[in-house]
Image: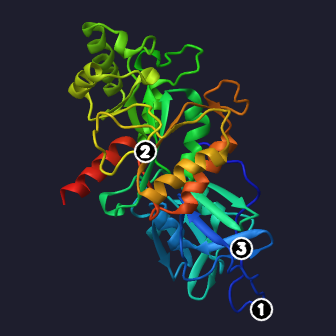
């Protein structure tokens, strides 16, 4: 996983009873995968470092924790690990040791016990578990990210929904958008032009291995047809069938599920719709509309806004706020993410981050981030109850 560039962050406070007091840190916020995490002991900040309760951080990152009082050692396990590590490990010092997946981990500060809780350096534990860490000085917030959080049906109670739908399958999604979606725990749909998947060529499109990795990291993979050279409405029946069937066949050779389709050039009619129904469960078009919840037609999902480099954050925010107010499903169409944003449908990473952060700050109780197929499934299930 790519590391998010950030300022120095870790953590340290001295053991209680040593005569050295910890700096107050009650105003430090902890966000894991975009969601605020409450701790029974406030995060502490000393010497530019932050410390958090070990169990809170580790368990939110999918790891288990064992405290060995006799050995004064914290054992953290994620994934496969030798079962006897705790039994064979010896600590011949009075210091608290940190062992992650069988390896003793050290930092320039040490774990400590405060208020009966073992506190550990945030950066040390998170990065050892494969997560990224960022310190936001302005907001006094520790960000930890390791995965996209796709919601369950129980997370939806009639609030608005939002989907970030990326067309074409560009490598800028993998390099620049995916790390931001993981930072905020934000779902996404990546619509791939199957006939342009990179195979060692020097192009702007993704390789099959990158598509698979994005899927494994929580991204929905959708189809954007096979070639994207001509509008589907201009294809004869045989070519139309090929464009939609072949695309799904190729993508299913990379990932196990491909259930949604985004229409090239957004040129769509009932003939295309009927063929699409044979291969997909949802079809997204562009008509500058919000979707009802549940949608009126799963094979005619509207895009609320197609983001270009001529748009401002406030213009995009208006569409998001509209979905919150009216409890609609806002699908946002995106393409390339590039610092130069030279093409009309390329935007700068800073704008994408601003959008994702705004949605994250609104909270999932106001607007629920979903990928395309999950949004359809969740909304439809709720209607059936």
Spatial CA span between label 1 and label 2: 60 Å
- Nearer-the-camera pick, 33 or 373: 373
Q: Nearer the viewer, mark 1 or mark 3?
A: 3
**Horizontal and vertical percent position of residue 104:** 59, 62
Q: Left or right of 144: which side holds 208?
A: left
Looking at the rendered structure, which numbered label has been put on residue 12? 3
**Horizontal and vertical percent position of residue 271:** 26, 19
Is 304 above or below relative to 346? below
Tag 3, which secondary structure? Answer: loop
Looking at the rendered structure, which numbered label has been put on residue 19? 1
Residue position marked by numbered label 2 in the rendering: 290
Is 38 above or below relative to 32? below
x 66%, y 46%: residue = 313
The quadrant in which the C terminus is found is bottom left
The crowding category of the residue bearing disc 1, from other C-alpha atoms within 10 Å (few below 14, some 14 to 19, many at least 20), is few
Q: Left or right of 192: which side holds 334?
A: right
Q: Nearer the viewer, mark 3 or mark 2?
A: 2
């Amino acid at each position: 996983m790519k590391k998010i560039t950030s300022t120095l962050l870790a953590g340290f406070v001295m053991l209680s009873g040593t005569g050295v007091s910890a700096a107050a840190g009650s105003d430090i916020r902890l966000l894991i995968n975009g969601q605020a995490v409450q701790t029974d002991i406030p995060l502490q900040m000393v010497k530019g470092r932050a410390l958090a309760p070990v169990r809170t951080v580790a368990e939110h990152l999918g790891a288990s924790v064992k405290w060995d009082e006799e050995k004064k050692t914290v054992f953290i396990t994620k994934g496969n690990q030798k079962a006897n590590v705790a039994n064979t490990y010896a600590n011949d010092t009075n210091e608290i040791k940190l062992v992650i997946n069988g390896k003793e981990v050290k930092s320039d500060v040490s774990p400590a016990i405060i208020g009966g809780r073992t506190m550990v350096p945030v950066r040390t534990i998170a990065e050892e578990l494969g997560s990224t860490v960022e310190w936001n000085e302005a907001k006094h917030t520790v960000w930890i990210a390791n995965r996209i959080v796709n919601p369950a049906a129980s997370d939806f109670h009639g609030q608005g929904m939002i989907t970030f739908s990326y067309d074409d399958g560009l490598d800028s999604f993998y390099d620049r958008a995916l790390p931001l979606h993981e930072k905020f725990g934000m779902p996404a749909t990546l619509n791939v032009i199957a006939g342009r998947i990179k195979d060692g060529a020097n192009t702007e499109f993704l390789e099959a291995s990158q598509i698979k990795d994005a899927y494994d990291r929580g991204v929905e993979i959708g189809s954007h047809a096979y070639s994207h050279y001509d509008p589907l409405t201009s294809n004869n029946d045989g070519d139309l069938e090929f464009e939609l069937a072949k695309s799904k066949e190729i993508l299913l050779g990379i990932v196990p599920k491909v259930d949604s389709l985004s229409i090239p050039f957004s040129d769509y009619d009932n003939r295309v719709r009927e063929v699409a129904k044979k291969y997909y469960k949802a079809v997204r078009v562009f008509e500058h509309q919000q979707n009802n919840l549940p949608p009126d037609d799963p094979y005619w999902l509207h895009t609320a806004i197609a983001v270009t480099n001529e748009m401002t954050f406030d213009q995009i925010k208006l569409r998001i706020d509209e979905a919150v107010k009216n409890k609609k499903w806002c699908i946002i169409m995106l393409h390339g993410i590039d610092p130069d944003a030279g093409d009309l449908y390329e935007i700068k990473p800073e704008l994408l981050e601003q959008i994702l952060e705004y949605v994250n700050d609104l909270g999932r109780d106001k607007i629920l981030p979903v990928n395309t197929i999950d949004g359809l499934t969740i909304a439809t299930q709720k209607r059936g109850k």
